[in-house]
C-alpha cells in the first residue's frame, strides 16, 4: 500500500507520544548519580515522580556538567542510545522518557493531563528531585516545547542549548502543518482522521528514513521499537490529545524568543536540513535572537542522530567544552 506523505502526515510525527506502561509493583532501585568510577557505562533507571515512574538513561561523572537530552515523537530516550556514550567521558548525560513515552508510566487520558505544560511540570519536578540545578538542554522535536518551558521558568539554570530540529518560530511551521492547524481550530473526527497516518508503521518508518542520504545506515530497530508503543490500546487517544495541545506552542513562541534575546544562552544548532517536519526555515530564525549561535545545516532528515550522530557528537563536544566546564 502506498502512502503520500502530505502535510497531515508530517504533522503527526510531531504530535504522537508512545510508551509502555510500567509495572508499579515491580521494585526498582533509585540511584541518584552515575558511579564516578564507571563513567562510560549507560545506566537504565527509574524514579517515582508525582505517582509516575519516570525512566531515564544516565552516564558520565556525577560531578561533571550535566546535559539533559529531551526526545521527540514517536520515540523516547532510545534515540540517544548512541549519543550518550560519545559524550559521557566528559559530561554527565541524562535522558528521561516523558509520561506516555518509552519505559515511563503511560496513564490514560482520563488519568493524566497530556499537555506540554504538564510534561514540562513532570520533567522539571524530576530534575528537582535529582537535585540537578544547572544543565545544558538538548532540544529535539517535542523536546523543544518541553525544554523551552523549563528554560523560561528557570533561565538561571540553563548553561547552554543544543537545538536539533526543534521549532520556536512561525517560519518553521510550513504548509506541511496545515492539517494539524485545522485540528487545532476545530477538533472533531473529520479533522482527526488524516492525523492518524503517522500512528501506522509506514508513517513511523518514514520519519526515520525521509531525507537521509543513505537509508541503509538507518537501523529498522528504530521503528520496530517505536511502533509497538504506538499500537498499545489507548495510545491513540494520548497522541491525538498531544496533537491538539501542540497548538498551544506557537502561542508561546514570542515568550521563548524573548527568553533567547534577554538571556543569550550559548547555543549550538545542528539541524537536519532535509526534514519536512521541521524544515531548515525553522533553524535560521534563531540567529535573529541569538546572533552568536552556531548553526550547522546537515545533509540528513528529522532524526539526524541516526546517520549524523558522530558529527553531532563532535560538534557538541567542541561547543560544550568551550562554553561549560568539562571533565578533562
Image: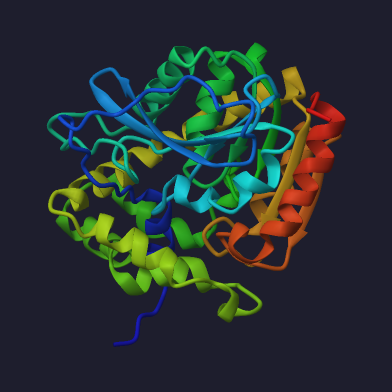
Q: Position of residue 274 (x, y in %)?
A: 64, 67
Q: Going by the image, does 102 lie left or right of 44?
A: left
Q: Nearer the viewer, residue 96 or 277?
A: 96
Identify which residue is drawn at 34% across, 51% down: 16
Name the residue rendered at 72%, 68% in the picture: 299
Residue 326: quarter of image:
top right
Give me the residue at 54% from left, 72% from top: 218
Answer above or below: position of 263 versus 291: above
Residue placed most toward the observer, 71 or 258: 71
Image position, residue 137 (x, y; %): 62, 32
Q: Is residue 299 above or below residue 17?
A: below
| Along the line of sight, the residue nearer the viewer: 73 or 222 | 222
Residue 128 falls left or right of residue 163: left
Q: Is residue 286 visible?
A: yes
* Extreme-front residue of the structure: 37
- Above or below, 155 relative to 202: above
Could you tell me if residue 6 is visible in this image? no
Q: Quadrant of residue 305?
A: bottom right
On the rendered structure, is 193 left or right of 171?
left
**x then y, percent, for residue 26:** 19, 33
Q: Residue furthest bottom?
A: 1
Amino acid at each position: 500500500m502506498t502512502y503520500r506523505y502530505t502535510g497531515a502526515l508530517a504533522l503527526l510525527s510531531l504530535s504522537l507520544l508512545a510508551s509502555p506502561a510500567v509495572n508499579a509493583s515491580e521494585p526498582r532501585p533509585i540511584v541518584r548519580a552515575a558511579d564516578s568510577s564507571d563513567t562510560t557505562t549507560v545506566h537504565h533507571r527509574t524514579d517515582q515522580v508525582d505517582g509516575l515512574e519516570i525512566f531515564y538513561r544516565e552516564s558520565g561523572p556525577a560531578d561533571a556538567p550535566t546535559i539533559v537530552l529531551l526526545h521527540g515523537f514517536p520515540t523516547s530516550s532510545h534515540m540517544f542510545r548512541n549519543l550518550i556514550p560519545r559524550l559521557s567521558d566528559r559530561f554527565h548525560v541524562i535522558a528521561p522518557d516523558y509520561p506516555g513515552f518509552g519505559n515511563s508510566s503511560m496513564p490514560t487520558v482520563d488519568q493524566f493531563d497530556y499537555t506540554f505544560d504538564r510534561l514540562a511540570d513532570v520533567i522539571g519536578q524530576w530534575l528537582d528531585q535529582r537535585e540537578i540545578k544547572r544543565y545544558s538542554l538538548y532540544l529535539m522535536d517535542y523536546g523543544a516545547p518541553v525544554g523551552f518551558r523549563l528554560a523560561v521558568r528557570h533561565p538561571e539554570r540553563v548553561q547552554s542549548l543544543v537545538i536539533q530540529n526543534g521549532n520556536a518560530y512561525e517560519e518553521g511551521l510550513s504548509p506541511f502543518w496545515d492539517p494539524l492547524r485545522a485540528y487545532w481550530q476545530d477538533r472533531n473526527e473529520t479533522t482527526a482522521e488524516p492525523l492518524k497516518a503517522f500512528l501506522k508503521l509506514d508513517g513511523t518508518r518514514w520519519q526515520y528514513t525521509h531525507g537521509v542520504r543513505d537509508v541503509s545506515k538507518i537501523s529498522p530497530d528504530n521503528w520496530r521499537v517505536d511502533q509497538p508503543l504506538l499500537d498499545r490500546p489507548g495510545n491513540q487517544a494520548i497522541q491525538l490529545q498531544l496533537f491538539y495541545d501542540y497548538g498551544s506552542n506557537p502561542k508561546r513562541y514570542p515568550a521563548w524568543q524573548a527568553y533567547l534575546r534577554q538571556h543569550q544562552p550559548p547555543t549550538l544548532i545542528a539541524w537536519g536540513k532535509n526534514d519536512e517536519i521541521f524544515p531548515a526555515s525553522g533553524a535560521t530564525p534563531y540567529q535573529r535572537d541569538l546572533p552568536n549561535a552556531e548553526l550547522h545545516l546537515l545533509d540528513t532528515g528529522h532524526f539526524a542522530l541516526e546517520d549524523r550522530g558522530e558529527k553531532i557528537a563532535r560538534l557538541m563536544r567542541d561547543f560544550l567544552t568551550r562554553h561549560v566546564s568539562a571533565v578533562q
